[in-house]
Amino acid sequence: MLDLNRLLEEVKDEIKHNSSYVDDNLVLKASYFIRKCTINNVDDAFLVFSSFNYLNFAVKQEGYKKLIGYFFKSKLNEPIIKCIDKKLPIKFNLSKDKDMAILYVGFDNFVFSFHNPTLDNELKDKLTDDVDFDNVYKQKAAAFIFKKALKSDCLSIDVSKLAKSKLED
């Protein structure tokens, strides 16, 4: 299982010293995990939400908005519902900040935030957990986080055996 407290400290350090980057292969992998949305445990869920975080970063980089688009924001419903149904210890909160909605996804002290997510109205009412945002904007280390999530030894899918052709299914 990922040590998310240690990862948060590593992310803070990574943000100070490096900036995230876009890699076409990582974009393919992140898109694959969002589409497949395999969630059987917390590490699976962390991989899926780190995929969203990575694409959220990548879409803002030159040349990628047209390539990726914001399709992934409409896919947030499924992993949230799976996590809730499986009673995984992940907290979700949807709050309004000025004129935008912010979805907070809390893995203990490690929190992802997504602005203006596309969520079903029925689901929005259920996202009321107390989530203390850690004020670390994960997009600044999106590639680092996604690569760490891929290396978890507790994933229910063997990511090392994914061939590029399978990623494009």
Image (cartoon, rainbow, N blue to C red):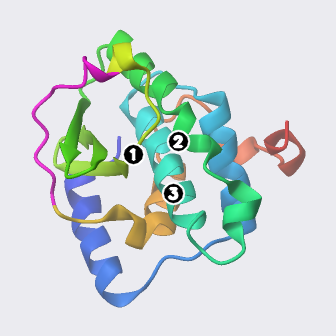
The kind of secondary structure element at disc 3 is helix
The answer to if 80 sits in the magenta stretch is: no
- Kind of residue indicated by mark 2: Lys
Quick check: 9 left or right of 23? left
Q: Give the residue at mark 2.
A: 73
- Residue 43: percent from left, percent from top: 41, 37
Residue found farthest to the bottom: 17
Q: Is residue 142 above or below residue 18?
A: above
- Residue 105: percent from left, percent from top: 29, 40
Badge 2 or badge 3: first in the primary sequence: 3
In front: mark 2 or mark 1?
Answer: 1
The kind of secondary structure element at disc 1 is loop
Q: Residue at position x 51%, y 67% from top?
A: 143
Q: Residue at position x 60%, y 74% from top?
A: 61
Badge 1 or badge 3: first in the primary sequence: 3
- Residue 25 seen anywhere in this rendered image of the structure: yes
Q: Give the residue at mark 3.
A: 56
Which segment is the magenta one?
Answer: 124-134
The answer to if 125 sits in the magenta stretch is: yes
**Around disc 3, counting alpha carbons within 10 Å, would you say few (fewer than 14), some (14 to 19), or many (20 or more)?**
many
